[in-house]
Amino acid sequence: MLKLHGECWVITDAAVGNQRQALALAEHLHMPARHLLLEPRAPWSWLAPRLTLASRLALPAAQRAWFAPPWPAVAIGCGRAAALFTRILRPLSAGRCYTVQVLDPRIDPAPWDSVVAPRHDGLEDANVLQTLGSLNPIDDAWLADGRAACPHFDELPRPRVGVLLGGPRHGIALDVDYANELGGRLLKHQQREGGSVLVLGSRRTPAALIEAFRLMLRGVPGLLWAGHDDGRNPYPGVLGWADRLVVTPDSVNMLCEACAVGCPVQTWLSAPLPPKIERFHHTLRSAGLLHDLGESAPPNTTAPLRETETIASTLAALIAARQSDRPPS
């Protein structure tokens, strides 16, 4: 990786998925990084990143001291709110700050030096770097750390099937009926092939789904984690030890992180998907990364989906070229 000068600001809102993508990318740039959790006030919050008039006042008074000179050499934002601040950093820094926006900012990408967006967003321009999916920190070292953090999972019978539950979103109803369908198929697999089932809920998973899985999988080796009341989040350990992963169809981030592991990944669809996420699923399936939860486990013949390092290397070259034109002050 090229040696880059200066500090990197990572700007996000409170959304965990946005934080995870931006922080993973910053880590691969190997720069001193500072994470700014910025929440603009109305009306900027309603219109971000379109409304830039008097945008320094968009922040609550307590946050204004964080967003102040000296400006960073690089800023990475993820999410619509962060896009407001990465957008205005270019003029505020007189072009010295290289601005990167992760995910489609929903306006012309020209105000940023680089925009990183998945193909299913359909965003194309000279400064757009397209990915198949979302950025994440998962690589061999991350998975090894996950196994080391949960060594007791090695004692569970194989195959170890990790199940990642998201939640309902527009056009995708993850309800108790869905849980019963998915759980029934998981039970059939476990009864036929043995092994264990490790179910992880997320912040978006309705309590009714958790209870449905808790009832259906009672007596099956494994675990069900739904929150901090169940102890420390074993997510890295589940991904590190899984022989197969089953992911609900709603979350781009969860599907991409599962596909980064290197084991077979399956999903269960009970109804057609909305067009945008259907395009994403189609891309994963075409690449051999995603399969239906059928009668048998798919073969593991596809390289894991790991795009963060590639995107970081491309950005590092662009940033280094900028810095060679403008030596750091």
Image (cartoon, rainbow, N blue to C red):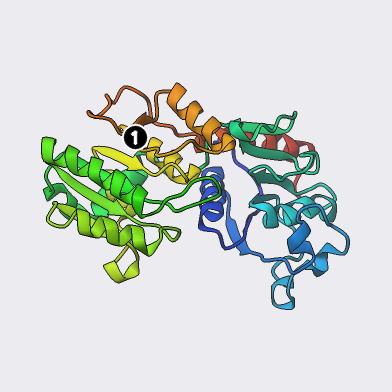
Q: Nearer the viewer, residue 68 or 289?
A: 289
Residue that numbered label 1 is attached to: 265
User: Which amino acid type corresponds to the residue marked 1 in the rendered image?
Assistant: Val
Query: Quick check: can you spot residue 144?
Result: no
Q: On the picture, is 195 further left or further right than 73?
A: left
Q: Tell me the residue at 29%/62% (across/down).
A: 211
Residue 13 location in percent, x, y? 61, 61
Residue 283 visible (yes or no) = yes
Q: Secondary structure at mark 1?
A: strand
Q: Position of residue 179 (x, y in %)?
A: 33, 50
Q: Position of residue 92 (x, y in %)?
A: 83, 56
Q: Where is 291 relative to 100, above or below?
A: above
Q: Is residue 231 above or below residue 268?
A: below
> What is the residue that sits farthest to the front in this orientation?
177
Q: Residue at x 21, y 48 (%)?
A: 197
Mark count: 1
Quadrant of the frame with the N terminus: top right
The residue under the point 30% across, 44% down is: 182
| Location of residue 57 with respect to 296 vertically, above or below | below
Q: Residue at 54% across / 37% down in the picture?
A: 277
- In the image, farthest residue toward the bottom: 62
Vertical order, 196 against 15 (above or below): above
Picture quadrant of residue 108? top right
Q: Position of residue 132 (x, y in %)?
A: 53, 31
| Left or right for 138, reference 39 | left
Q: Residue furthest right?
A: 53
In the figure, is residue 268 to the left or right of 23?
Answer: left
The quadrant holding residue 109 is: top right
**Badge 1 local density, few (<14 within 10 Å), some, or many (20+)?**
many
